[in-house]
Image (cartoon, rainbow, N blue to C red):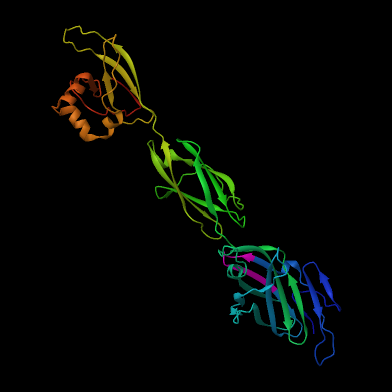
């Protein structure tokens, strides 16, 4: 009979190829030679399906069919002297499970005579690697570059052995090591350092105010590497998400390869609000002795926000005094504004004598009114 791990011609002798070494033995009681054929490289597929599981699909062929045992063993590329059984979760042939029920890294399967059959073995790779590859700090190693050996046997007839090419098994989730914003307004470059022990391609979910950011780049995945990581950039359209405002914004970054890595959150300062500008167009004298002096000015704001104008005056030889309060207090503190306008307290009365807070024009208004409405970006008063 002839047992093989793939379709090929049967020849006598011991066969060695790059992917495996095949040994032969005489079938007990039969006296005939067992002839094993090599396995084509294209007939085995190794795939990391998750951080936990490596799926191995392979073909089996046996001339007289029957029960076969397929054993899986693995070792780390840089430690070839330590070989361990690859404990399986389950395998399938069609809809039938062929589980590694004993947890010994072997599948018991059946094949039809001369019928090439595809099988699947699901190796609990990360669990095995963590068990066997503890580091000095006992934190464990979750991924490694390994080789898997597949050995197919039929009792009393011999065996066929295949070794895979080196591949990465297990997984460490990626992590964001550092982050900075290279601008404060408009399209903001977000510079990110990403590390991943297995150098997997990584996607990044970036969120602001619990919503995905509006990106101006088209990158889907980012190449990574072990610490100190690899630098990449995202380009965030802050005006679209945050509007024409200024303030602190929390950016949340979530890296993901086979698994989601830890969330990285950092606040950045965004200032999409340009300062309003005022230009005095004309100052006229008081022709009617009312002591009211018309002042024509233009107020501009790039974002057409509502704005307030404070008029100070001083004798030419004395110069302007400092404002008796912070402008931000005038804009954001309604209680202070109310007292400034109406309080009889001496400190507020002094402020009112020194300042005029202008209303929106063109109507003449004696007194105080806040926030001229700049509906078109500029208004002449």
From the viewer's side, name the closer residue of 133 and 27. 133
Relative image position of residue 8 (x, y in whole percent): 80, 74
Task: Tell me if residue 53 is in the magenta stretch.
Answer: yes
Most distant residue in the left direction = 344
- Residue 97 or residue 336, whichever sits in front: 336
Query: Looking at the picture, how far across and down is residue 26, in whole percent?
Result: 82, 86
Q: Does residue 346 lie above or below 150 as drawn?
A: above
Q: Quadrant of residue 128?
A: bottom right
Image height of 325 relative to 102, above or below: above
Which stretch appears magenta? 47-58
Question: Which residue lies most toward the bottom here?
Answer: 29
User: Is 242 displayed left or right of 105 in the figure?
Assistant: left
Residue at the location (16% across, 10% down)?
A: 290
**Quarter of the figure that contains the C terminus:** top left
Across and down, in percent, residue 46 comes to: 66, 66
**In the rendered view, does 35 fall on the left or right side of 190?**
right
178 left or right, relative to 123 = left
- For the residue pair 311 and 118, the one nearer the viewer reads as 311
Q: Position of residue 37 (x, y in %)?
A: 80, 76
Q: Residue at x 52, y 46 (%)?
A: 178
Majority secondary structure in the magenta region: strand
Q: Is residue 210 visible?
A: yes
Above or below 56: residue 106: below
| Residue 329 falls inside the magenta stretch | no
Looking at the rendered structure, the number of numbered marks drawn on it comes to 0
Which quadrant is home to the N terminus? bottom right
Residue 37 appearing in the image = no
Q: Quadrant of residue 278?
A: top left
Residue 304: image quadrant is top left
Foreground of the two, 38 or 130: 130
């Amino acid at each position: 009979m002839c047992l093989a791990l793939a379709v090929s011609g049967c020849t006598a002798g011991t066969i060695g190829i790059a992917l495996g070494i095949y040994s032969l033995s005489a079938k007990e009681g039969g006296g005939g030679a067992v002839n094993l054929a090599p396995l084509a490289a294209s007939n085995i597929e190794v795939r990391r399906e998750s951080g936990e599981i490596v799926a191995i699909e392979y073909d089996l062929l046996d001339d007289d069919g029957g029960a076969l045992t397929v054993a899986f063993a693995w070792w780390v590329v840089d430690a070839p002297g330590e070989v361990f059984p690859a404990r399986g979760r389950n395998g399938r042939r069609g809809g039938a499970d062929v589980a590694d029920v004993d947890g010994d890294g072997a599948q018991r399967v059946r094949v039809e005579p001369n019928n090439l059959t595809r099988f699947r073995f699901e190796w609990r790779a990360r669990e095995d690697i963590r068990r066997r590859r503890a580091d000095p700090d006992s934190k464990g190693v979750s991924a490694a570059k390994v080789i898997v050996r597949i050995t197919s046997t039929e009792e009393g007839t011999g065996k066929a052995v295949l070794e895979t090419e080196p591949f990465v098994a297990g997984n460490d989730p990626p992590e964001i090591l550092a982050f900075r914003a290279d601008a404060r307004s408009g399209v903001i470059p977000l510079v990110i350092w990403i590390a991943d022990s297995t150098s997997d391609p990584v996607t990044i979910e970036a969120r602001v105010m619990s919503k995905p950011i509006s990106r101006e780049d088209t990158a889907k995945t980012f190449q990574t590497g072990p610490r100190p990581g690899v630098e990449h950039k995202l380009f965030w359209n802050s005006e679209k998400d945050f509007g024409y405002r200024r303030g602190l914004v929390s950016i949340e970054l979530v890296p993901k390869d086979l698994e989601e890595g830890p969330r990285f959150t950092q606040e950045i300062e965004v200032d999409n609000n340009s300062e309003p500008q005022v230009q005095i167009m004309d100052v006229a004298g008081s022709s009617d002795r009312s002591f009211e002096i018309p002042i024509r000015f233009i107020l501009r704001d790039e974002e057409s926000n509502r704005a307030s104008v404070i008029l100070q005056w001083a004798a030419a030889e004395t110069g302007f005094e400092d404002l008796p309060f912070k402008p931000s207090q005038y804009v954001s503190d309604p209680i202070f504004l109310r007292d400034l306008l109406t309080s009889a307290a001496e400190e507020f009365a002094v402020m009112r004598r020194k300042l005029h807070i202008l209303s929106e024009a063109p109507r003449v208004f004696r007194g105080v009114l806040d926030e001229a409405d700049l509906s078109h970006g500029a208004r002449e008063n």
